[in-house]
Amino acid sequence: MAGGAPGGASKSEIYKGNGPRLLLPAWIFIGVFLVAPVAIMAIYSFLTKEFRGGVIWEFTLAAYDQFFLDRGLFGDEPPSIEWTYIGIFWRSIWQAGLATVLCLLIGFPTAWFIATRDVKERSVWLFLITVPYWVNLLIRTVSMKFLIRDTGPLNELLLALGVIDTPLALVNTNFAVQLGLFYSYLPFMVLPIYAAVERYDFSMSEAAADLYASSWATLRLVILPVVKPGIVAGCILVFVPSLGAFLAPDLLGGAKTFMIGSLIEEQFKGAAGNWPFGAAASMILLTIVMGVLLVHARAQTKGER
Amino acid sequence: MAKPVDLRRFTGFRAITWLCLFVLYAPLVIVAIYSFNDSTSITRWGGFSLKWYVDVFTGPEAPKFRDAAINSFTIAIGAAVCATLIATAAAVAMNRAGRFRGKTASLALINLPLMVPEIVTAVASLVFFITIGFKTGLLTIFIAHIVFCIPFAYLPISARMQSVPDTYEQAAMDLYATPWEAFRLVLLPLMVPGILSGFLLAFIISLDDFLITNFVKGAGVETLPTAIFGSVKQGIKPNIMAISTLLLGVSVVFVTLSWIIGRAGQSKR
């Protein structure tokens, strides 16, 4: 991607020499109000906590120590690994991963189906898939909760149909959180896969069949290499926001489905009020996400070569 | 010999697509239906009624929601305007200014708000404003919104600029137009669909935001999402369903507009 946009449009030099000047507002806004804040947050993670929120400007590793090490109730025991927070991160990764798989299982056939329609039909399907994404995320999550709660319309319907005898307890389960994440980010899976399948030239599979390839071989050797970047991009676009999601776990989950987003939020909004610890957890989350994106970018540039 | 399979027609894919649409729309449709429920209980259907809509505008919680709505729309319009201006300038630099130092880094920077997890941006913004002694309130929400709206405004604007060839501007320059005239009189009119789509996306994204707003809003200041979240924490009430349905309507109208504008822009070429 570094080489500029396809079609050579970026080679245009109409306003040559004005580039840096035109980018100045973007640099100032994102630099001052995003890059600098993240840097300050990084500093906060090394500060001492003040009770009832806030920090004392004394440098310490206490926040990271609390995250990774267990020193017993009074802090005087030899340190062992503290599993509570690592566990919350692990659960978040697991939940985000399952939501990604769910999105892939539903999103791939959907994207494939849409990409193989007529051009006019495609844009209508795409529109239908993307509209819910633009509806307020909070409203979508609340709607999902309303639908699947114990006395909600879904249970009423299933009871009336005689499919179940007792209402399904869906809210406050891991599945509800995965469903919420799936519901939140599904279009992120469909769109890149759609874009990849749309580029695929179906005469290639005909050529493969002419050369006696089985349909499985065609899928694996001809189609998959073309579609794979779309699948990978879709998985990243679903996994990354799911990992730090707050609304779906908070509204659809319970104490047992506590995820990173809630852990961090609690440090700033809740009673726990440990700002350096919240900043440290944010730094660890940011590191994981940037790691995933970096590995992806590396693989992409390697593939282009 | 291999059977000639038509790979375009996997059986079952159509059914999964319909299932997908069903899952996406069912919760919203159900909530929209129940917002017209006459019963006070959210579970039982008690006949059609508009009373929860009346309640939203005149009920005991009406002033709270009115203030929140005014805040939400003011911030969304303001942030979308600023983000669109910044993004348009950036798109010109990226697509029309040749090569220069820091171009690749600039693209990464513009996309940075999409890559940093929302909760991290929220925390970072809060500690930043506290550290520089900036009182959290409407202004801090406004600034934070501009930042994360920039990439959403940038994407359609830049895409549109790529698809417009620069030959018209070159012709204008050959006829002694200054670069500013070439931009204002030639490129800008051609960019209208892209700029409008960018503005609308930024507007919706701003209206949608809960997490970052919740961190930087300060005490007593509410936007619609934070006000709704506060109410929902005490249980889903019928008036919340009415508000949700109204907001849902706004989103659908704006996205449809953006779609129509985008298509009009495409067919013009």
Image (cartoon, rainbow, N blue to C red):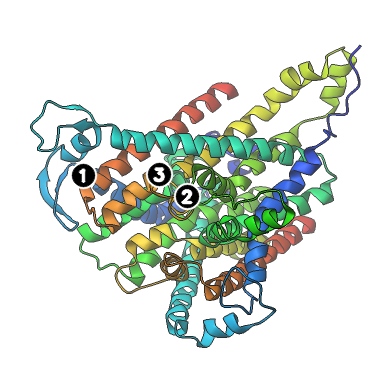
Q: Amino acid at mark 1?
A: Ile
Counting residues from the start of the chain, the first of labels 1 and 2 encountered is: 1
Q: Position of A184 compared to B127: left or right?
A: right
Q: Quadrant of residue B106?
A: top left
**Whole-percent x, y for residue B226 in the image:** 42, 67
Counting residues from the start of the chain, the first of labels 3 and 1 encountered is: 1
Reply above or below: B167 against A189: below
Q: Which residue is mark 1?
A: A43
Give A102 or A10, whichever is nearer the viewer: A102
Reply above or below: B155 against B192: above
Q: Quadrant of residue A60?
A: top left
Q: Quadrant of the N terminus of chain A?
A: top right
Q: What's the chain of the residue with tag 1?
A: A
Taking the spot 64% from the left edge, 62% from the top edge, the residue there is: B28
**Whole-percent x, y for residue A240 in the image:** 48, 40
Q: Which mark is residue A172?
A: 2
**Whole-percent x, y for residue B119 in the image:** 38, 50
Badge 1: how crowded within 10 Å, few (<14), some, or many (20+)? some
- Secondary structure category for the residue under label 1: helix
Counting residues from the start of the chain, the first of labels 2 and 3 encountered is: 2
Q: Which residue is mark 3?
A: A256
Q: Position of A227 compared to B57: left or right?
A: right
Q: Amino acid at mark 3?
A: Lys
**Whole-percent x, y for residue B67 in the image:** 43, 80
Q: Quadrant of the C terminus of chain A?
A: top right
Badge 3: how crowded within 10 Å, few (<14), some, or many (20+)? few
Q: Position of A301 compared to B223: left or right?
A: right
Taking the spot 26% from the left edge, 60% from the top edge, the residue there is: B129
Q: Which mark is residue B194?
A: none
- Secondary structure category for the residue under label 3: helix
